[in-house]
Image: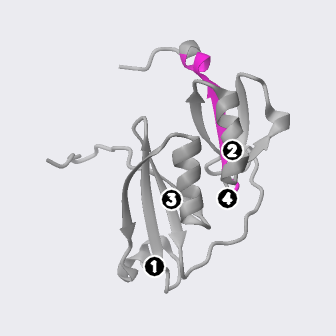
Amino acid sequence: MANRIEGEQTAFNHVGICVTDLERSRKFYEEVLQFRFWWELEAPEEGTSQLLQIPSPVGLKAVYLLRDGLVLELLYYSEAKAEPFRKRVMNEPGLTHLSLSVGDIPAVLEKVVPHGGQIIEESDLKMAIIIRDPDGQLIELTSAEWLDALPPLPA
């Protein structure tokens, strides 16, 4: 049975990230950050261009990954090529970063560069560090102790 929302209700759906190499990005998020594959979609040209405000042809393939209830959508455009990477910073309006708590930061960091990512060494606080995915998306890694320091979730 499908999840239903009604009236003024709102439900989280997903966070989308544009990628330039779908397989490389899948491996990065699955093998480095432990996301799991959910499903993929080859979006129909009709409507996709209008919805995304990208001129046809678009050639969108989307892969959906899951981790701890977060749905991450990797968007790859075979026709409407992605703009070149531009270094984004944390005080730029819009989505700044993803944040994940991990049990062993050094073990995760060992996998970042071999999977096409980058470690921002100067951000290392030992209990938190910033990395970039293969396309430059900022990702904050925090230690599991961070979760213990958080206040209880609201009811």
Q: Furthest-left residue in view?
A: 1
- Compared with residue 111, is residue 65 higher up or lower down, i.e. above or below? below
Label 1 crowd (10 A; few <14 / some 14-19 / many >=20): some
Sequence-first disc among 4 and 2: 2
Mark in front: 4 vs 2: 2
Q: Amino acid at mark 2?
A: Val
Label 4 crowd (10 A; few <14 / some 14-19 / many >=20): many
Locate residue 55, reporting x and y percent.
53, 84
How many numbered circles are shown? 4
Q: Which mark is residue 34?
A: none
Q: Which mark is residue 135?
A: 4
Sequence-first disc among 2 and 3: 3
Q: Which mark is residue 74?
A: 3
- Residue range in magenta is 136-147
Q: Secondary structure at mark 4?
A: loop
Residue 129 as seen in the image, left or right of residue 18: right
Residue 12 as seen in the image, left or right of residue 143: left
* Residue 23 is one of the magenta-drawn residues: no
- Compared with residue 21, is residue 145 higher up or lower down, i.e. above or below? above
Q: Are marks 2 and 3 in contact (CB under 8 Å)?
A: no
Q: CA distance from mark 4 to mark 3?
A: 11 Å
Judging by the rendered image, the residue that carries numbered circle 2 is: 112
Sequence-first disc among 4 and 3: 3
**Quadrant in the picture for the C terminus:** top left
Judging by the rendered image, the residue that carries numbered circle 1 is: 49
- Residue 133 visible? The answer is no
